Image: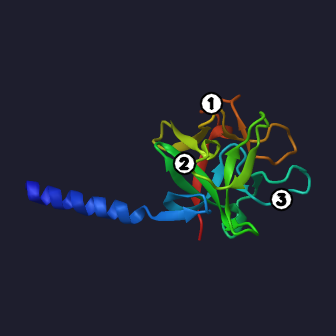
Amino acid sequence: MKLSTLSAAKTAALALIASAVATTAIGAAGSAHAENGYWLMHNRGTGQCMTTENDPHNGIGGTARFAPCNSGDRRQWWLRAVSGPDTVAFSTHDVTSSGKHQCLENATGGWGLAFLADCDFGNYRQSFTLEYVFFPDGTASTVYKAQLDTRRLSVPYAAGTSYVTIRNDFPNEDPRMQWDQLATP
């Protein structure tokens, strides 16, 4: 292959990548680069997806929860947006009554719950680092570590609750720490 052909191919590939990464404004506080639009965030350990749907059996509002995966339910649609070097933020699809998107936040005080707050990409509590778990068959899954500390997105602490938590008591290889992106319509 000639150098000019290689350069043209490289330029075309970069143009394709640039067109695939759209700049999306999320909330009034900042912007981020969308990776692939909205996804369902599926936890391998629970077999369920992350949602903003309220659970009448669990009383703490304003948190992400688990529900059976339903690609038609926009409360389960999440935008995984690049918020900084090697970090992502998770924005909801729907907006609040004040017209803002909400993002997952690693709240202070050691609560261990994935709270929802207005998106602010200057807020490091909303940034998660990507870690990958590779399997012998060549497949992989993603683990999301809070930038604030070493805790990662995971399953509920207590049986019978539906809260998405941020915890650090399972290894990355445990399916309860692993998340896959499932397509939305």
Give the residue at mark 3.
Answer: 54
SS type, badge 3: loop
Question: What amino acid does circle 1 point to?
Answer: Thr
Residue toward you, 169 or 81:
81
Residue that appears at 86% across and 40% down = 159
SS type, badge 2: strand
Determine which of the numbered discs, if any, sits on residue 88 in the image.
2
Determine which of the numbered discs, if any, sits on residue 174 in the image.
none
Quarter of the picture containing the N terminus is bottom left
As measured in the structure, the alpha-carbon distance from the residue carrying label 1 to the one carrying label 3 is: 27 Å
Can see residue 153? yes
Can see residue 49? no
Which of the marked residues, 1 or 3, is nearer the chain's N terminus? 3
Q: Quadrant of residue 80?
A: bottom right
Give the residue at mark 1.
Answer: 150
Question: What amino acid does circle 3 point to?
Answer: Asn
Q: Quadrant of residue 101?
A: bottom right
Question: Can you give x and y, in whole percent of width and height, for residue 135 in the image?
Answer: 51, 37
SS type, badge 1: loop
Crowding at dot 1, Cα within 10 Å, few <14 / some 14-19 / many 20+, comes out as few
Residue that appears at 65% across and 52% down = 42
In this rendering, the answer to whether 13 lies above or below 159 is below
As measured in the structure, the alpha-carbon distance from the residue carrying label 2 to the one carrying label 3 is: 24 Å
Question: What amino acid does circle 2 point to?
Answer: Val
